[in-house]
Amino acid sequence: MKTHRVALIPGDGIGRDVVDAAWSVLQALAARSGFALSGTEFPWSCAFYKETGRMMPEDGIETLRAFDAILLGAVGWPAEVPDSVSLHGLLLPIRKAFVQYANIRPHRLLPGVQGPLKAEGFDILCIRENTEGEYSGAGGRVHQGLDNEVAVETSIFTRKGVERIIRFGFEQARSRRGKLASVTKSNAQKYSMVFWDEITKQLAAEYPDVAVTSYHVDALAARMVMAPDSLDVIVASNLFGDILTDLGAAIQGGLGFAASANINPDRSAPSMFEPVHGSAPDIAGKGIANPMAAIWSGAMMLDHLGEKDAAARVMAAVSAVTAKGIGTVPGKDSTDAITAAVIAALTT
Ligand code: GGG
């Protein structure tokens, strides 16, 4: 029987609750399917940072390389550890080291979930560039604490990085409804974003079957609210993708439903699966975190591992549960109750 080796990083806050939930759903499914999942847990988190001064050990990346996939909960919190430390000490190095350049974030309304808009057919796939751009970590500060203090943060856009993510967007659009929205702010940012627009145009010639439109990010955000049905696949830079997918999450009923996959399309290293949400300190430990985003991320992991039927079964179970109104209203059902309902739905 095939065994998939998964590194589990619950992280901080509700990360623990939602990874436990997703893992029990995946295990329940594996037991009924023809594969096994072995999980190895790593305590890398802000608590780990407080003990060791690092978000993960020096050889953390090499340790993870041995796995088929990574399932991560959330990072950030408690507040003594700056958010920039948790992000730049764990999440971003994993995405960069394993060339997980495509962050795939599906936004659609699950049955029974009431989003804030009347957008019943809402179904957008956001492809976020995940290894460079505005989150490159290049910059510095001088004259700290003085009146003339300066902070500089440089966005890095490479031809290789931009080409591969836009190409990925075209491929996704081709496999869906054939529409691609390429997002920039090239009227204001005249180097990197103009470069992005140029590459979009160049690649468009290779995809005559895909209708591509370049949008400014502000106009695209408005379109997501006013005319969501006009959109199919969105491809955006690291920062713009991060922001637009919180908007997408809101439209799909909240961050509790927003799943994501950090994919290494070449499969030269493990990919990582994580809910879009953060550690949600306000509800941490209360047992009411919505595990749907983590369970959906787990389904994306199964799909990536080649267990396509199993992935579809997880999503069918999730849909059956939300269709009954379970897990659709924040805080109404406990994490455990939602998880148990999804597991029960796997067998029916
Ligand atoms: N689920 C992972 C997590 O904690 N996300 C919070 C966050 O701020 N992520 C930023 C990013 O995805 O780049």
Image (spheres, rainbow, N blue to C red):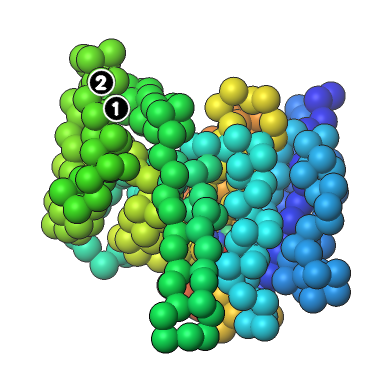
Disc 1 designates what residue? 199
Residue 194 appears in which quarter of the rendering? Answer: top left
Percent position of residue 139, x then y = 50, 58
Task: Tell me: residue 131, above or below residue 221.
Answer: above
- Asked whether 191 or 303 is in front, the reply is 191
Q: Is residue 222 above or below residue 311?
A: below
Query: Would you say the beta carbon of the disc 2 residue lies within 8 angstroms of ligand 1?
Result: no
The amino acid type, in three-letter code, at marker 2 is Gln
**Residue nearer the viewer, 187 or 337:** 187
Give ligand 1's quarter of the image.
bottom right
Considering the image in quadrants, where does the C terminus appear? top right
Where does residue 105 sit, x and y in percent of width and height?
Answer: 44, 46
Residue, x 28% and y 35% (percent of image)? Answer: 195
Q: Circle 2: is it few (<14), some (14-19), or many (20+) Cα within 10 Å? A: few
Whether residue 223 can be seen here: no
In three-dimensional space, the C-alpha distance between marks 2 and 1, rounded to whole angstroms, equals 5 Å
| Location of mark 2 (residue) | 202
Question: Residue visible at 41% across and 40% down?
Answer: 157
Q: Label 1: few (<14), some or many (≥20) within 10 Å? A: some
Residue 193, given in percent of the width and then of the height, sits at 27, 43
The kind of secondary structure element at disc 1 is helix
The answer to which image quadrant residue 248 occupies is bottom left
Q: Is residue 254 left or right of residue 55?
A: left
2 and 1 marks in contact (CB < 8 Å)? yes
Residue 102 bears which disc, if any? none
SS for callout 2:
helix
Q: Name the amino acid, label 1.
A: Ile
| Pick the front one: 97 or 340 | 97
Taking 339 as reference, is 94 above or below it?
above
- Viewer-proximal residue, 330 or 5? 5
